Amino acid sequence: MTENEIKTIVQKTLDRVKVQRIAPEKMTLKLAKELTAAVQNEAVKKGVKAVVCIADSAGNPKLVESMDDAYIASYDVALNKAYTSVALKISTKKLSVLAAPGGELYGVQFTNGGKIVIFGGGEPLCGKNGEIIGGLGVSGGTEAQDTELAAFGKVYFEKIMQ
């Protein structure tokens, strides 16, 4: 799925909601719930039973929801993807390249008590001024599916922050 296709899907979803918003300066529970619901709806369309984690600016979980029949292991993975994206200020997909053998950050996954994830499905979430106010972690599908769902969530988040 291309970035333009993801943006189109997000815009259509937002057009259906048509709610006036005031963008918060921090990750709120209300914002986390809205973002989680949007990602879960997209996961249903893709046939993925995901765990979605929204972390605050310190990488601590604000909200974690497991869809029915999601893998038990996906809970911890989603949590750590959200943490990683906040702690290192980068998507876990981009980190996978840097952490590959020979990469600048090779071995980073062995730091932070093993909480660093080096495969796709985690995205940092930035406020209007570009500061990180949270992170999104998605786990339950293939790496490609998790990456697409997290990218969808990031684009959705950016639209509602405008």
Image (cartoon, rainbow, N blue to C red):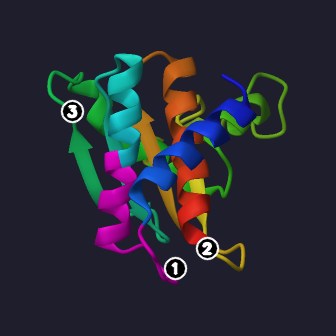
Q: CA distance from mark 2 to mark 3?
A: 27 Å
Tell me if residue 115 can be seen. no
Can you say whether 5 is above or below 36 in the image?
A: above
Please state which of residues 95 and 52 is positioned toward the viewer in this rendering.
52
Total count of labels: 3
Task: Find residue 77 and name its label.
Answer: none
Residue 22 colored magenta?
Answer: yes
Residue 149 colored magenta?
Answer: no
Task: Find residue 23 and name its label.
Answer: 1
Amino acid type of the residue that numbered disc 3 sits on in the rendered structure: Met
Amino acid type of the residue that numbered disc 2 sits on in the rendered structure: Gly
* Tag 3 residue: 67
Residue visible at 28% across and 23% down in the picture: 49
First of labels 1, 3 by sequence position: 1
Q: Nearer the viewer, mark 2 or mark 1?
A: 1
Report x, y in % for residue 148.
57, 29
Q: Which residues are magenta?
A: 19-37
In the figure, residue 66 lies in which quadrant? Answer: top left
Q: CA distance from mark 1 to mark 3?
A: 27 Å
Split into 4 quadrants, where in the image is the N terminus? top right
Residue visible at 15% across and 27% down in the picture: 68
In the figure, residue 72 lies in which quadrant? Answer: top left
In-image side of 144 versus 21 (left or right): right
* Tag 2 residue: 127
Report x, y in % for residue 44.
32, 26
